[in-house]
Every structure is written in structure tokens, then in C-alpha cells.
Amino acid sequence: MSAVFVASLTLSHFRSHRRARLELDGRPVAIHGPNGAGKTNLIEAVSLLSPGRGLRRAAAEDIIRRPEAIGWKVVAEVAGGGLGHEIELSAEPGQPRGTRIDGKTSPQTALARLLRIVWLVPSQDRLWIEGADGRRRLLDRIALSFLPDHAEAALGYEKAMRDRNRLLKDQVTDARWYNALERQMAETAAMITTNRRDAVARILAAQDGAATAFPAAGLTLETDDLTTAESYATAFADSRRRDMAAGRALVGPHRADLVATYVDKGMPAAQCSTGEQKALLVSLILANARALKAETGAAPLVLLDEVAAHLDAGRRAALFDEICALGAQAWMTGTGPELFIELGPRAQYVAVADHGGASEARIVDASVP
Ligand SMILES: Nc1ncnc2c1ncn2[C@@H]1O[C@H](COP(=O)(O)OP(=O)(O)OP(=O)(O)O)[C@@H](O)[C@H]1O
């Protein structure tokens, strides 16, 4: 089965892009242009073809192009892997994002069953040294790529926890108010923890013996010792009094962490150099893509924003080789075409420039800088 790829992408009033249309084949997409030209905005649009708020975690409202401030739309035709679909995303001012698949209004979570998308963005460069939030998000993206129902579990858990937090803040003590919410939290928590363990195991297996220039990452999921819905339900009930004092849930999968080590050096990721930390992240994304390809027969879409930053020329060339070997349509951004020189004709090129306050994106010949 060939990889799934975006065959066309049309943006209207999406951030800096008043209108853009790209027609593409399955090769990697190398996007270049000066700072602020609108490169990341393009791959952000692609990231929204997956459930959630995309690679910037933006609200639909923030994406609306200023100063016009009228609704935005993204239309993508996806092909390959035995499928062909049209996905339309849009939002009017003050409205949440809407999703249509093949002309039919669909829940956002349905996207996870259509397309697998993995990404790496510069805000993750400090992921190993900052708080656990970013690491949990990375892990949840990986889990979602393998297990599409992870999105529903995560949304269900968040909603029930928010409602329970409200009761805690209002100092409600009657257990009857908590039971149904804690049951929902417990069921989704068990699913989330199982999915995360499963995702870690798959990444570790995909790294085992892999031919890659990137360092193996040892991964440990630090989470409560709870797995079943029953054990979570008991833990939530037991923790209610302490939670009320804190005004929030003190146990649950929202407290988990993903700990990584640079295996060959026996070094915690947080103590590695900036370039080594980036290499570990690239390694995880590549392992994720390899595992998905082995499982589904098709490589996922890969989004790599400013991928060249912190990677030396040797590592960059190795990354390009591995992406091409996977057959993934990897969308990569960089300030100049020279950053993609090692890709040559194995990629298609998009130049992005600012024209009087609006981005212009067009396919260009790789040989013309
Ligand atoms: N809602 C919006 N409406 C109009 N313009 C926006 C909106 N949101 C962001 N922009 C503008 O989009 C421009 C391009 O942003 P983007 O992050 O895509 O640039 P980039 O090409 O990736 O740049 P860099 O190389 O600096 O990372 C920025 O100048 C930003 O101000």
C-alpha cells in the first residue's frame, strides 16, 4: 500500500494566507521562504487534518485572517493508501471549527481514522527540560496515531475532570454528585493509560534493531500504578477530600510523565546537548512513522517545522534519506532552499513569500533558488 498524501491543499483566509492552492504528489514537500513568510501557517493547516488544535494548539478564532476577520477554510484532497477523500475544515468568527468529510459534516475525531499525522515543531526543542505537559502531549499524539479512539478517551476524561473540578471548587461534599463523573473519568483514564503504555511499547519495538542514524531513546511512562477503571474509580473517590483542598484532581493520567534517556550514553534526555535532545525527538518521530507503516502498510504524514535547526548537515542528510525510505509525504520548512539540497529531485518544493501583507505559496523548481 502506498503512503497516504495530500494531493491538493487550498487555504482561504487562513492566517497570513488570503488564498493558496497547492497541487502535490506523494513526495516530501520542502517549504522555504524568509522569516514570517507563512511557512508554518501552511503546515499548521495540514496539522488540522487531525483531531485537536493542530501544531500551534490554536483556537479557531486565532486562525481567522486579520484584518479581514471573515471565516477561514482549508480544503484538502487526500489520496494514496487505497483511499481518496476530501476534507473541509472551516470556522466563522465566534464559531468552533467545523469538519466535513466527503461533503458530510463529521465529528473532528473521525479524522483520526482517515489520516495519521505526526509532527515536530520548534516549541518542542525544550520538551525534555520543561514541564511534563509537552511530554504528555507528545505521548498522546503518538498514542492517537496508533489508536484513533485515544482522542475520544482524552476528550471524555478532560470534560469529566473539568465538571468534577467545578464541584470541588464549590465545596460540594455529597458523593452522589461525584459518582457518575468519577465513573466516566475512571473509564477514560484506564483507556488513556492503556493506550499510552501501548504507544511506548510500540515505539520501543520500532527502535529495536532499526537502521537509523538517530539515537535510540529509552522511554519510561511514569504514571499511577492503576490500570483498570475500578482501580481508578476507587482512587478518585479516596482522593476527593485532598482534591477538594487543592481545588483539582491530584491523581489521574493528567499527572503522568514520559521520561527519556539517550540510551548509548546512558544519559537522561534533559542533560543532553540541544542537538542531541533534538535528535532524540527526531528519532521518536521516525520510530513512530516506521511503526505506523509496519502496522498499516502506509507511512503517516510527517510535519517537521524548521527541521534543520540544531541538526548538522550529516544528520540532516540522514533524516532526508530515512524519510524518503519511508515513502512519507513529509512537510518540512526552512528559511532557504539550500537547507534541502540533499533532497534534490526526491522532494517537491514550495516557495513562500510575503506580498503586501498576504502570503503567496507556489510550487517551484528545486534547482531555482
Ligand atoms: N490570524 C492571522 N492573520 C493574519 N496574519 C497572521 C495571523 N496569524 C499569524 N499571522 C502572520 O503570519 C505570518 C507568517 O507566520 P509563519 O509562522 O507561518 O511564518 P514562517 O514563514 O514560518 O516564519 P519563520 O521562518 O519566522 O518561522 C506572521 O507574520 C504572522 O504575523
Image (spheres, rainbow, N blue to C red):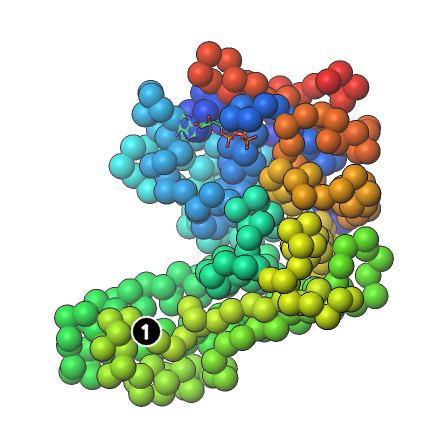
Helix, strand or loop at label 1? It is: loop
Dot 1 alpha-carbon crowd within 10 angstroms: few under 14, some 14 to 19, many 20 or more: many
Q: Provide residue 257's location: percent of width, then percent of height.
A: 51, 69
Q: Check disc 1 and report the residue beneath it.
A: 249
Q: Provide residue 13's location: percent of width, then percent of height.
A: 42, 25
The answer to whether 65 appears left or right of 126 in the picture is left
- Measuring 61% from the left and 73% from the top, which residue is drawn there? 220
Front in this rendered view, residue 180 or 283: 283
Q: Is mark 1 within 8 Å of ligand 1?
A: no
Front in this rendered view, residue 92 or 129: 129
The answer to whether 312 appears left or right of 23 in the picture is right
The residue type indicated by label 1 comes to: Ala
Q: Provide residue 8's location: percent of width, then percent of height.
A: 61, 29
- Measuring 68% from the left and 50% from the top, which residue is drawn there? 275
Front in this rendered view, residue 197 or 309: 309
**Rendering quarter of residue 315:** top right
- Measuring 32% from the left and 68% from the top, which residue is drawn there? 161
- Measuring 82% from the left and 61% from the top, which residue is drawn there? 210
Q: Provide residue 108's location: percent of width, then percent of height.
A: 44, 49
- Position of the C terminus by quadrant: top right
